[in-house]
Amino acid sequence: MAHTQEGPVALSIRAKITEALAPTTLDIKNESHLHAHHEPMRGNTNPETHFKIMVVSESFTGKTLMQRHRILHGLLEHELQTGLHALVLKTKTPAEMEKETVQ
């Protein structure tokens, strides 16, 4: 599926996560506009600095929350070094999502 409204950083995030984790769900929201007024962002013209990402993948089975987040930070190391400022991550397995949905 094409994500035509996504910028280059979001597209890179999507490609790297999709290739590495084969997610059943991948939701990427650019929340940079919500943080533009923060002091560290003053003068920054990059429209892709803050993202909220939900990843559901079998690859997370048996991994702790910290391990899951480290995987994503490792995948996105280049982006984090070149302008990506913050990530809000939700990482689940398909079984965890199913259990969450039932409750």
Image (cartoon, helix red, strand yellow):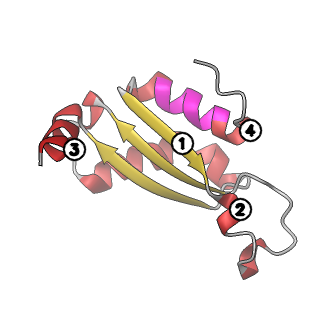
The kind of residue tagged 2 is His
The kind of residue tagged 4 is Gly
Q: Nearer the viewer, residue 97 or 61?
A: 97
Q: Secondary structure at mark 4?
A: loop
- Based on the displayed image, in which of its 4 quarters is residue 78 positioned? top right
Mark 3 surroundings within 10 Å by alpha-carbon count, few (fewer than 14), some (14 through 19), many (20 or more) = few
Q: Secondary structure at mark 1?
A: strand
Q: Which residue is mark 4?
A: 7
The kind of residue tagged 1 is Ile
The kind of residue tagged 3 is Lys
Q: Which residue is mark 1?
A: 28
Instruction: Give the CA separation, mark 1 to mark 2.
Output: 14 Å
Q: Nearer the viewer, mark 4 or mark 3?
A: 4
Q: Which residue is mark 3?
A: 63
Instruction: Give the CA separation, mark 2 to mark 3.
Output: 32 Å
Q: Which residue is mark 2?
A: 33
